[in-house]
Image (spheres, rainbow, N blue to C red):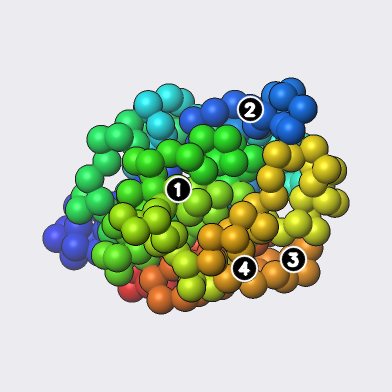
């Protein structure tokens, strides 16, 4: 490791992760959730393999909860991969030692990444610290990656005039069709694709569950868990 060339090429990447372990449905019941395993693990592995450093931030600095459903064999292409995802999460010291989102200084990082899961629908969608960070990251020109349900956080990125900071941007996000197939569309208080569209964000809808990554300026977004690995590739390209 230790040469000066190594230090120059290493970047610090900020992962902003939901701090909740539930998602409140329309009838008031709490669905257990958190962040989605693959959406954190695939980019984590890609960035670490490229020699970069990762810092995790959550609201209040709470240790993030992985959605147990995201560790199931059937959503990971088999038990072997499910075990690998769970193993990476358990071994990632960054996940066990998050900093407070409220204390983040964007200047400290070369790029920002938001993994999904239903958790962001609960907290990041209404978190003003996260919204201000997203607006600043977008305006800074630094690579900004957001995947699956994490674009819910974009809803809190509002300018002084009330307009959404991401209005007019083309993005990918978890679609109404996917939420329907996942069994939650009729239980949710609101649907991500609809709310983003209402905010003036241009959601580019791809086939359900198939990788769909949209790049618009410094913003790189992915539609679903399968989009997280290809999204990481695009973010690494932007980091140079």
Q: Nearer the viewer, mark 4 or mark 3?
A: 4
Q: Which mark is residue 156?
A: 1
Taking 2 as reference, is 77 left or right? right
Q: Alpha-carbon distance for marks 3 and 2?
A: 26 Å
Q: Is residue 61 above or below residue 196?
A: above
Label tally: 4
For mark 4, what is the residue? 203
Q: Are marks 1 and 3 in contact (CB under 8 Å)?
A: no
Assign a secondary structure to mark 2.
strand
Q: Where does the image place residue 43, in percent across and percent down from the top left? A: 51, 54
| Residue holding disc 3 | 210
The residue shown at (58%, 71%) is 202
* Quarter where residue 138 is shown: bottom left
Give the CA distance from mark 1 to mark 3: 27 Å
Q: Secondary structure at mark 4?
A: strand
SS type, badge 3: loop
Residue 22, which numbered label?
2
Q: Which numbered disc flags the more N-terminal residue, 1 or 3?
A: 1
**Residue at the spot 74% in from the left edge and 47% down from the top edge:** 76
In primary-sequence order, the first of circles 4 and 3 is 4
Residue 126 image offset from top left, x and y in percent: 48, 40
- Any part of residue 85 in sight: no
Q: CA distance from mark 1 to mark 4?
A: 17 Å
Between the C-alphas of marks 1 and 2, the distance is 19 Å
| Residue in front for this viewpoint, 55 or 169 | 169
Give the label, 1 or 3, closer to the camera.
1
Residue 195, by quadrant, is bottom right
Earlier in the chain: of badge 1 and badge 2, it is: 2
């Amino acid at each position: 490791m230790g040469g000066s060339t190594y230090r120059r090429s290493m970047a610090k990447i900020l992962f902003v992760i939901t701090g909740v372990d539930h998602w409140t449905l329309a009838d008031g019941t709490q669905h257990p959730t958190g962040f989605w395993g693959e959406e954190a693990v695939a980019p984590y592995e890609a960035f670490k393999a490229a020699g970069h450093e990762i810092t995790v931030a959550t609201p209040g600095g709470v240790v993030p909860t992985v959605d147990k459903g995201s560790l199931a064999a059937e959503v990971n292409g088999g038990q072997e991969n499910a075990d690998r995802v769970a193993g990476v999460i358990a071994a990632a010291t960054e996940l066990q030692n998050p900093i407070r989102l409220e204390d983040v200084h964007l200047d400290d990082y070369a790029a920002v990444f938001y993994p999904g899961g239903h958790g962001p629908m609960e907290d990041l969608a209404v978190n003003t610290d996260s919204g201000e960070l997203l607006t600043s990251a977008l305006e800074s020109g630094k690579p900004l990656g957001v995947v699956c349900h994490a674009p819910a956080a974009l809803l809190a990125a509002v300018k002084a005039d009330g307009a959404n900071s991401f209005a007019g941007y083309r993005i990918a996000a978890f679609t109404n069709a996917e939420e329907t197939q996942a069994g939650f569309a009729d239980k949710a208080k609101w649907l991500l694709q609809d709310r983003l569209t209402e905010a003036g964000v241009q959601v580019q809808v791809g086939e359900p569950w198939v990788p769909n990554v949209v790049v618009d300026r410094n913003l790189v977004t992915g539609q679903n868990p399968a989009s997280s690995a290809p999204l990481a590739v695009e973010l690494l390209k932007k980091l140079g």
